[in-house]
Amino acid sequence: MTNSNIALCFYGEARHWQVGAETISKFRNLSKDKFNIDVFCHLWDNITYRSKNIRDLIKQNVDLDSRCVKSSNLLHGDLLEQYKPVQYKIESKDVLDYYVDKFNPSDNYMTCDEYKLAIKYSNTPCFSQVYSTAQSFFVLRDYVKKNPNIQYDLIIMLRTDCSFDDRSIIDKTIEFYCKYVNRKDCLLVERLSLVPKRREPWIYNGYMLGTYNVFDQFFDEFPKTNIGMGQYKGFTWRGSSHAEVANYLLNYTAIQRVWPILIRSHPWFVGKYKQFNLEKLSIN
């Protein structure tokens, strides 16, 4: 019997990364006769606080490095030792400037340069998150191109603070999802909601399951629009990651099917997050 190859792709700021290490350990404790587990990472070299007043801080010309950044210039040595990724990439958020300049977001709330700061020093707007999600797949894609004999039956995108209970990570459940995503060629997301008042779907994408082909369609020529740059219709400068990801999937990708993970009688596979508290950071 051929083993199923599973890729865990971690992305974003390495907040509470020890939680992700526990998740990896559970996957590596699956039957070695059935599964091979590889880890990939795209990580930022800093960790910021969850700020709910980043725009006020920017407008007041506050020193954002001292007020918003919890840790900086990170090489993530301890994380890499425990995660043992087969390939990874660590970047400064300065790489985001190119894309923000390209789409030039600007309105009554903030200028383009102010949006750059909001994106780099907070998670709202959410461009740094969706960029890192895409990059975690690109890290895997580069690895596959260098090692064409390796193909992944299941790719799981997730944050470093995402944990799953013992009921979620068992041989039978992971076998099911390996087969299902390939048979249906679909993207499975954490949750999917309809918001009638806004006449739009929302997708909760903290963790997602799919095939190489599906994620390649998702992130082909990413980003094709100003996703996560504070310009989404009907929202303030903060935007909405759930609405914007759904809009991007519907209008800018070739993905055929997007379903919630627990559709119909699918086996239990539910994650939770150990998030930072949302704070109003001091201006003075």
Image (cartoon, rainbow, N blue to C red):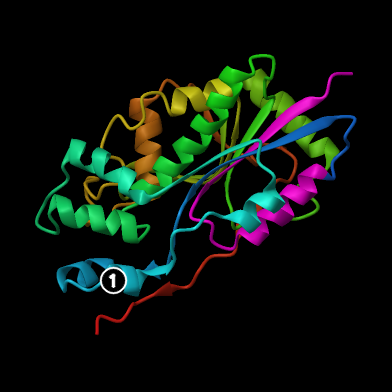
Screen quadrant of the C terminus: bottom left
Name the residue: 20% across, 67% down: 58
Q: Is residue 139 left or right of residue 67?
A: right
Residue sitting farthest toward the left: 108
34 displayed left or right of 242: right
Q: Secondary structure at mark 1?
A: loop
Say which quadrant the N terminus sits in. Answer: top right
Neighbour class for label 1 at 10 Å: few (<14), some, many (≥20)? Answer: some
Residue 264 appears at what percent x and percent y?
Answer: 67, 36
Q: Is residue 215 visible?
A: yes
Please tell me which residue lies in front, 172 or 282: 282
| Residue 176, quarter of the rendered image | top right
Residue under the point 53% across and 32% down: 139
Against 41, is 65 above or below?
Answer: below
Q: Position of residue 110 (x, y in %)?
A: 14, 57
Above or below residue 231? Residue 17 is: below
Magenta region includes residue 2: yes
Residue at 30% over, 41% down: 227
Q: Nearer the viewer, residue 233 or 174?
A: 174
For the point 80% across and 51% down, the residue is 167
Q: Position of residue 174 (x, y in %)?
A: 77, 36
Determine which quarter of the picture holds residue 147.
Answer: top right
Is 275 colored magenta in this rendering?
no
Identify residue type, mark 1. Answer: Asn
Picture quadrant of residue 64: bottom left
Magenta segment boundaries in residue numbering: 1-28
Mark yes or no: residue 185 visible: no
Residue identified by numbered label 1:
53
The reply, left or right, for residue 144 in relation to residue 268 is left
Q: Residue furthest bottom?
A: 284
